[in-house]
Image (cartoon, helix red, strand yellow):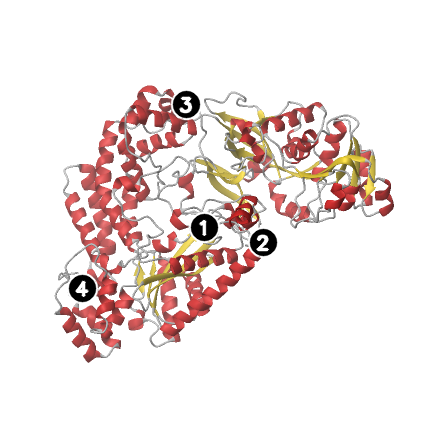
Amino acid sequence: MIIVDELPFRFVEKRGFRNFCRVGMPRFDVPSRRTIVRDILQMYVDMKMSLMKQFRESKVRVCLTIDTWTSIQNINYMVVTAHFVDEKWQLQKRILSFSQISDHRGETIGKCIEKVLLDWGIDRVFTITVDNAASNAVAILYVKRKLISWHTDGAILDGKYLHLRCCAHIVNLIVNDELGELNDSIVAIRNAVKFVKSSPSRFESFKKSVEREKIQHKGLVVLDVPTRWNSTYLMLASSLKFVKAFDRLDDEDGNYQNYFKGNSNKPKRVGPPCFEDWENAKVFVQFLKTFYDVTLQFSGSLSVTSNLYFHKWSTINNQLTSMSGDANHLVSQMASSMRIKFEKYWGSLDKTNKLLIVAVVLDPSDDSSVFDLSIAFSEIVENEDNIMCKNEVERYLLEPVERKRSNFDVLNWWSVSSAHYPILALVAKDVFAMPISTIASESTFSSGGRVLDSFRSSLTPKMAECLICTQNWLQAKYRTSQLEEEIMQPQSDDSSLENLQFIEDAESASVSYPSLLFSHHFLIPKMTKSPDGEHPVKAFGWAATDTSGHLSPFNFSRRETGDEDVRFKVLYCGICHSDLHREVTEVGSKVEKVKVGDKVGVGCMVGACHSCDNCVDNLENYCPKVLLTYNSIYTDGTITYGGYSDHMIANERYIIKFPDNMPLDAGAPLLCAGITVYSPLKYFGLAEPGKHVGIVGLGGLGHVAVKFAKAFGAKVTVISTSPSKKNEALEHLGADLFLVSCDPDQMQAAVGTMDAIIDTVSAVHPILPLISLLKSHGKLVMVGAPEKPLELPVFSLIMGRKTVAGSGIGGMKETQEMIDFAAKHNIKADIEVISMDYVNTAMERLAKADVRYRFVIDIGNTVAATRP
C-alpha cells in the first residue's frame, strides 16, 4: 500500500489510519515508519534477487529503453527499463535502475548502462531504444562493444541492429519545429486559456460563460506546454468546444479585455482569439490528430508495438502527401516542411532498423507485401540452424493470413504455434518485445502521469530508486492482461478531455515531476522536462543542484499575477526562506489591503482551503490543505518556490503589512520565529501581567520568546544547559531569572514556581524536569520539534493536573496582530545579515549553532550584484 499508492512513510503513524486499524482490525499491530522503511528495503532486495534469478534461468534476451532526464536544477537522471516476453508469452517490463548521472555525454550514459547490466547479470540484449540525440548513438556503440566482449551472442549480428530510435521522438521532431513557427492564432488561444487558468475568480467567470452558453461538454479548457506539440493539440481541441464561451468573455468581462491590452509596464498580448483564429485552430486540430494518435499508439508499454511501425509510417506518409496539396496555404506549407524532416529520418528503408521489418512479417494478421523481406530474414537467421529455420520460414509464409480483428493477440498466436515453428517462435519473442518508444519508461516516474510529491522529493536517490523500482515490480506482479497502461491510452477526443479540473490540469499532457526545491531542508530535486511551460514569468534565485545541498544562482519561472494576488520584490529573507520582507511591485485588480510600494512580508504559508473549521476560525496554519511558502502545489497547479529569489507572488490573504517603524531586516524572522512563540503566549493565557513564564532554550526562537513575554508583562525565567548564556539572558534580553537545567540545586529551588513553559528546543531532551517546574494547572508548550519521540511522564501530569501541548506558527489574522504588537513594543529579532553568497557557509554554521540568533539574507543587494 505504501509503495503502490505512493504514500509517505509516516502515513502509518497518522491518527486516522491508526483509528481505522483499531476499529476494523483490532488485532493488527500497526508498524512504525522505521519498520516500514526496513520492510520496503528488504522487499526491494528480495524482489530484485527473484527477478535476477528469473533472467538467469530463462536466459531471456531483453530489450532496453533508456531515457535521460534533466531536473530544472540541471541534475541528470536516467531510467533503464527491460522489456521481454516471458515463458507464458506475456509482454513484461521491469525498471532496472533509476539513477543519477553526472552529465548527458554518450560515454557517461554508456557506462551507466554497463553498470546496470553488470549489476543485474544481463549479458544478452536484443535492442536498446533511445531518442535521437547524438550522445545516445555514442552510448549504444559503447554498450555494443561491451556486449560483444562479454558474450558471443551478446548482441545479434554483432550489434548491427542494437540501436533502435524512439519513433515517438521522431514524430515530435517532425511536428514540433513547424508548430513552433506557427502562428499568432495558437498564441492568441493560448493567451485566452492562460487568462482562464491564472486565478480561481477568472476560472469561475469562464465557467459562468460556459453555463450561459449551455455548453454541455464535461471537460474544460487545457493549457498547453509550448514545447510539447501534443499538449498544444489537446489545448486547441478542448478550446474549440468553448468558442462561444470565450466570445462571451470578450463581450462581457472587462478583465478579459484588459488582459490583452498593453501598458507602460507590459507589452500587448496577442489576442483575444478572433473568428479567423478559431478557423485556423480547426485546421490545426484536423492536421495534428493523425500525429497525436500515432504517437499514442507508438507509446504503448504493455502491448506489442514493434509490428505497428510500418503501418503508422504509411499513415503519416499519406497524410503529408495529402496535406501538401491542400488548398489552405498554411496547411500545405506546414506539410511540405514536415515532409523534409520525414524524408530525413524515415525517407528510405535503409534508415529503418530491419528488425522492425521482421516484426511485420511475423505478425500473422499482416498481409503487407510492399517490402523485400528476404534480406532481413536471411540476416536474422544466420545464427540459427539455417536449414531448419529456412524450412520454417517457407512454411510460415505459406500460412494463410489471419483475419484482421481488433482483439487479435499476436503473442497468443505464437504461443499456440511455437511447437510448429520452434525457431521462429524464439525470434518472435525477441522482436515483439521491442518497444519503439521510450515514453513507456517516462510514464514509470509517476503512475497515471501524477507528479512526484514532496515526500519522494526529500528522499535520497537510492531510496527513490528503491520505491520506484519496487512499485513497478509490484504493479507487474498483480497486473492482469487487461490492465490499462499507466500512460494515456488512445481515446476519442471527448473521453481524453473528460473530468479535467482547474487544479489538476495546469500541466496537462506533460509527464513530469514537479519543480525544484529552494529549501535547504530538502536536497533531492524535483524534475520536469518542460519547466518553462509551467509558469510564464521569469525569476532569478538560488537552488541546490545536487545532494551536497550547495546553493548557486538559478533562473526559473513563477506564475502570473491573478486578480487577488500581490507580486513583490524580495529585499530580505530569513534563512529558512519563508520569513520574507519585500516591496510590492504589482497588485491584482481585486486587491484592497496593499498597494504598489508598500512594505510587506510573507510567512510560512501562502494558501489553505478557506472552508474548514480551522480556516473559519482564522487558524489557516492548522488547515489540512495548508500550502507552504515553498514546495507546495498551488491551486492552479503551479509550484511555490520559497523566498531565495528576486521576487515572489502570493494571495492577498497571506500578505502581512509591515508598520513603518519595523526594520526591514530584523523584522523578517518575526514572520516565522516571532509568530511561533507569540501564538502560544496568547492562546494559553500568558499575555497577562504577573504570569511566570519559563523559556527553554536561548536560540532563534527562545530569544524572541523572552522579548514577547516581557512585553506582555510576564516574569520570565530562561532555562538553558549553558551557563555562559546567563548574562545574555539577563542583561541583554531582560529576563528576570536564569536556570541552568543541568544544575540539580537550581532546578530543585524552582520546582512548582511557573505558570507555563515555552519549550523551543528541537534536540531530544527530558521533559520530566520541566514539568516539575510547573505550578498545578501549569502548561508545558512545545514549539520545538525533536526528531525522535520524547518520553512522557504521565504520573507527573496527573499529580497537579498539568498539561503538555504543542503549537505551530499562527493564522494570518494573528500574524498581523503579532507584527503590529512587535512594532509597538520595539520587538525585533537579533540577527546577522549575510549576502546570498555566504549562505552555504551560514548553513554549516547553523548546523553547529554558531549564530546569534538568526541569519537574515540580504536578497535585494545580492540580486543586484549577482543577476546575470
CA gap, disc 2 and disc 3:
58 Å
- Dot 3 amino acid type: Asn
Q: Tell me: residue 254, above or below residue 479.
A: above
Q: Secondary structure at mark 4?
A: loop
| Lateral position of residue 752 relative to residue 110, left or right | right
Of labels 1 and 3, earlier in sequence is 1
Pick the front one: 344 or 299: 299
**Is the Cβ of the residue at disc 2 closer than 8 Å to that at disc 3?**
no
In the image: residue 337, left or right of residue 510: left
> What residue does disc 4 label?
364
**Nearer to us: label 2 or label 4:** 2
Looking at the rendered image, the disc whose residue lies closer to the viewer, 2 or 1, is: 2
Q: Which mark is residue 5?
A: 1
Element under disc 2: loop
Dot 4, crowdedness within 10 Å: few (<14), some or many (≥20)? Answer: many
Do tag 1 and tag 3 residues touch (Cβ < 8 Å)?
no
Q: CA distance from mark 2 to mark 1?
A: 18 Å
Amino acid marked by disc 4: Pro
Q: Nearer the viewer, mark 1 or mark 3?
A: 1
N-terminal of the two: label 2 or label 3?
A: 2
Labelled disc at residue 390: none
Which residue position is annotated with label 3?
263
Q: Amino acid at mark 2?
A: Ser
Q: Nearer the viewer, residue 851 or 117?
A: 117
Residue 697 quadrant: top right
**Residue 198: % across, % down:** 41, 31
Amino acid, disc 1:
Asp
Label 1 to label 4: alpha-carbon separation: 39 Å
Q: Residues within 10 Å of mark 3 (few under 14, many from 20)?
A: few
Q: Give the residue at mark 2.
A: 32
Dot placed on the residue nearer the N-terminal end, 4 or 3: 3
Rounded to the nearest angstrom, the CA distance separating label 1 from label 3 is 48 Å
